[in-house]
Amino acid sequence: MDTASFGISHAAPSLYVDVDVVVVPAVDGEPRPAGRPRRKRPARRKPDGRRKAMSKGITAKERRDLLRADGFASWLRRPLTMTLDFHPRHLDQYPAEDLDTFFQRFRRLVSTWCSRKKIGSYWVWTRENYEGDRREHLHMVMHLPLRLRGELESYIRRLFPGGSELVQIGKRTSERDPETGRRRDGLQYRMKQLRGDAVGKPGPYRLPRETKNRHDDAPVAPVYGKRCGVSDSLTLKAEEKWRAERS
């Protein structure tokens, strides 16, 4: 049978279908084919470097950095031989600002004094806290000639009036650890509030970790903000620059 007699064409069926293409303007004015609308992904928020958090102890990395800075200070012939302990609870007027900000201002004032005395600012610092009212305090292990010890203490007391136990400046010494019986250096002692990752694996080299005050059994409490640090002159960047200049 001849299909031509029925008037049937062999052309492709698609030629007989009218397709309406809908054009949707894009956001930038250029047309694009209609379809499922694209969802704009929300921009990821970068962490706010200024945001402060509670810190429960010194980390392993922070501990290594404190020890590195101590060794670097000796290379610079600015050994950290003196300690400074500052207890805000003995102030005549307790700070209204958070202690993280207050201790930053305190260290800045000490740095200004050291610059005037032309000895430079070389130190490491830690913060400790115990549960209770106003138990947080600051420790510094620093380069300070013995002849200037009394001058620095008088300077601090003029700026921050308080009781006799407000500030103590003394020589860096070692103390016997009541738990292990071994002697512990003055800097290591001031790093005793460690986080779990800093104490190491169980064994003879595991570091002691303070969980409560040895005098009144008050549990260790977190601090708000940075827990420890080093002066600008003892940072890793400063050490790398120093070594590059000597090579």
Image (tube, helix red, strand yellow):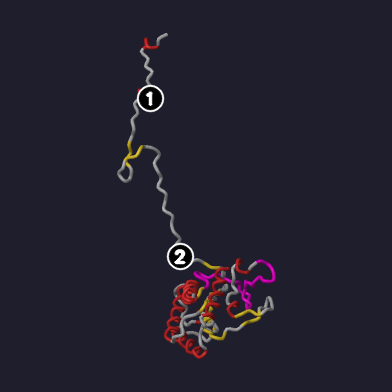
Expressed as whole percent of the image width and height from the top left, the position of residue 190 reads 58, 77
> Does the image show residue 206?
yes
- Locate residue 24 relative to residue 122 in the image: left or right: left
Quadrant for the N terminus in the image: top left
| Category of crowding for the residue at label 2, using alpha-carbon neighbours closer than 10 angstroms: few (below 14), some (14–19), many (at least 20) | few
Q: Nearer the viewer, residue 86 or 205?
A: 205
Specify the label residue 51 is tagged with: 2
> Does the image show residue 103?
no
Separation (CA) of disc 1 from disc 2: 63 Å
Expressed as whole percent of the image width and height from the top left, the position of residue 55 reads 53, 68
Q: Mark 1 or mark 2: which comes first in sequence?
A: 1
| Category of crowding for the residue at label 1, using alpha-carbon neighbours closer than 10 angstroms: few (below 14), some (14–19), many (at least 20) | few
Q: Which residues are magenta?
A: 201-228
- The amino acid at mark 2 is Arg
Instruction: Please tell me whether residue 148 belongs to the stretch shown in magenta.
Output: no
Q: Nearer the viewer, residue 2 or 20?
A: 2
Which residue bears the numbered disc 1?
Answer: 14
Q: Looking at the image, is mark 1 or mark 2 nearer the viewer? A: 1
Quarter residue 220 falls in: bottom right
- Locate residue 197 relative to residue 112 in the image: left or right: right
Q: Nearer the viewer, residue 234 or 164?
A: 234
Expressed as whole percent of the image width and height from the top left, the position of residue 246 reads 48, 76
Expressed as whole percent of the image width and height from the top left, the position of residue 177 reads 66, 78
Q: Secondary structure at mark 1?
A: helix
